[in-house]
């Protein structure tokens, strides 16, 4: 069954949103303005990408940082590349809207 926009916006757990905002602020500055921009960013990402796909893409990105032959699948698999591309598009859209 397809999710409504409201359901998709609310499928990101609060802790996941907070983790994103903390990391965003650590990178961009610890100001009130940046809190608003980072919160906007994760809200936009959540409106585009279901949480499950967000987690999968973040996992692929994390695994790509690990060396070794067994991790090569995360660098070359079409499905992994699609997940990452979808996340990157959502992040780019959020950047345009929020920053």
Image (cartoon, helix red, strand yellow):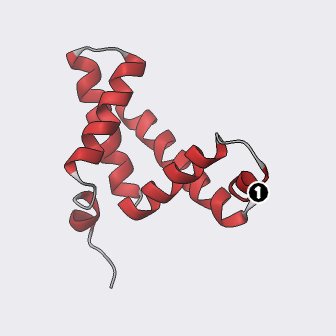
Q: Is residue 29 left or right of residue 91?
A: left
- Within 10 Å of disc 1 (Cα), the crowding (few <14, some 14-19, many 20+) is few
Q: Is residue 54 left or right of residue 86?
A: left
Give whichever of 79, 47 is nearer the camera.
Answer: 79
Q: Is residue 85 left or right of residue 15?
A: right
Give whichever of 67, 99 is nearer the camera.
Answer: 67
Image label count = 1
Q: Position of residue 80 (x, y in %)?
A: 64, 60
Q: Position of residue 31 (x, y in %)?
A: 25, 14
Q: Please tell me which residue is depicted at 71% across the width and 53% down the height of the picture.
A: 71
Residue under label 1, please give it: 76
Q: Where, by quadrant of the figure, is residue 1 drawn? A: bottom left
On screen, 12 above or below 3?
above
Furthest residue in direction bottom, as rendered: 1
Circle 1 sits in a helix, a strand or a loop, which is it?
helix
Q: Where, by quadrant of the figure, is residue 98 drawn? A: top left
Q: Please tell me which residue is depicted at 40% across the width and 63% down the height of the picture.
A: 52
Q: Position of residue 24 (x, y in %)?
A: 37, 28
Q: Is residue 99 left or right of residue 43?
A: right
Is residue 41 something one can see in this rendering?
Answer: yes
On screen, 28 above or below 45?
above
Q: Please tell me which residue is depicted at 30% across the width and 29% down the height of the picture.
A: 22
Q: Please tell me which residue is depicted at 26% across the width and 72% down the height of the picture.
A: 4
Is residue 99 something one can see in this rendering?
Answer: no
Image quarter of the C terminus: top left
Q: Where, by quadrant of the figure, is residue 54 drawn? A: bottom left
Give whichever of 70, 45 is nearer the camera.
Answer: 70
């Amino acid at each position: 069954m397809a999710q409504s926009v409201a359901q998709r916006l609310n499928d990101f757990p609060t802790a996941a949103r907070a983790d994103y905002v903390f990391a965003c602020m650590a990178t961009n500055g610890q100001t009130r303005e940046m809190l608003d921009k980072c919160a906007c960013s994760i809200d936009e990402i959540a409106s585009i990408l279901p949480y499950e796909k967000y987690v999968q893409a973040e996992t692929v990105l994390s695994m790509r940082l690990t060396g070794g032959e067994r991790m090569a699948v995360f660098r070359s698999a079409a499905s992994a590349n699609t997940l990452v591309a979808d996340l990157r598009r959502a992040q780019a859209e959020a950047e345009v809207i929020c920053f």
